[in-house]
Image (cartoon, rainbow, N blue to C red):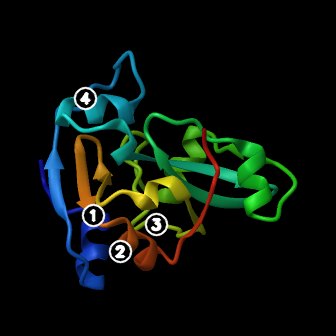
Amino acid sequence: MSMATRATRALDAAGVTYRLHPYDYEADAAVGKGLQAAAALGLAPERVLKTLMAWVDARPVCVVIPSDRQLQPKALAAACAGKAARMMEVAEAERRSGYKVGGVSPFGQQRPVPVWFEQDALAQPGVWINAGQRGLLLEIDPADAVRVLQASSAAISR
């Protein structure tokens, strides 16, 4: 498995420190991909963040939340000053991000969109986020992730 992805190249270009963590990706895991990654790496699920692609009204957004939580569409819409939010279809998420679902990273997206983090995740001393391919997470300081992505944060999951 190559460890260089658009996500890692974007972080390298920004001068951000991170560590890569490969794991055995299970496409048909009984639990969500983020929870499967947390279990494979022996990490607390709240420190492994999943990346979701969504729509707020007609605007695309990228959402980063702990793997043991669910996105709250109404809260996301309110945070983005919109009326309604919904998940993006798989094909559209892959086309916009340039990554395969299960490997979507907020870093180095093909067509960058505004990024929203669950605010609770920012209190962690370090988080693990997809590095741009299935079976590869990167460990990063959440403050660095927010800075590089120029992301916003709000209570958008439960």
| Residue type, label 2 | Asp
Instruction: Assess disc 4: are there few (<14), some (14-19) or many (≥20) residues with their C-alpha within 10 Å of its C-alpha.
Output: some
- Kindly identify which residue carries mark 1: 140
Q: Nearer the viewer, mark 3 or mark 2?
A: 2
| Residue located 60% across and 69% down the image | 114
Sooner in the amino-acid sequence: mark 3 or mark 2: 3
Instruction: Assess disc 1: are there few (<14), some (14-19) or many (≥20) residues with their C-alpha within 10 Å of its C-alpha.
Output: some
- Can the viewer see residue 56? no
Q: Position of residue 14 (x, y in %)?
A: 30, 84
- Residue 122: mark in rendering: none
Q: Are marks 2 and 1 in contact (CB under 8 Å)?
A: yes
- Residue 144: mark in rendering: 2
- Kindly identify which residue carries mark 3: 110
Instruction: Assess disc 2: are there few (<14), some (14-19) or many (≥20) residues with their C-alpha within 10 Å of its C-alpha.
Output: some
| Residue located 45% across and 72% down the image | 146
Q: Nearer the viewer, mark 1 or mark 3?
A: 1
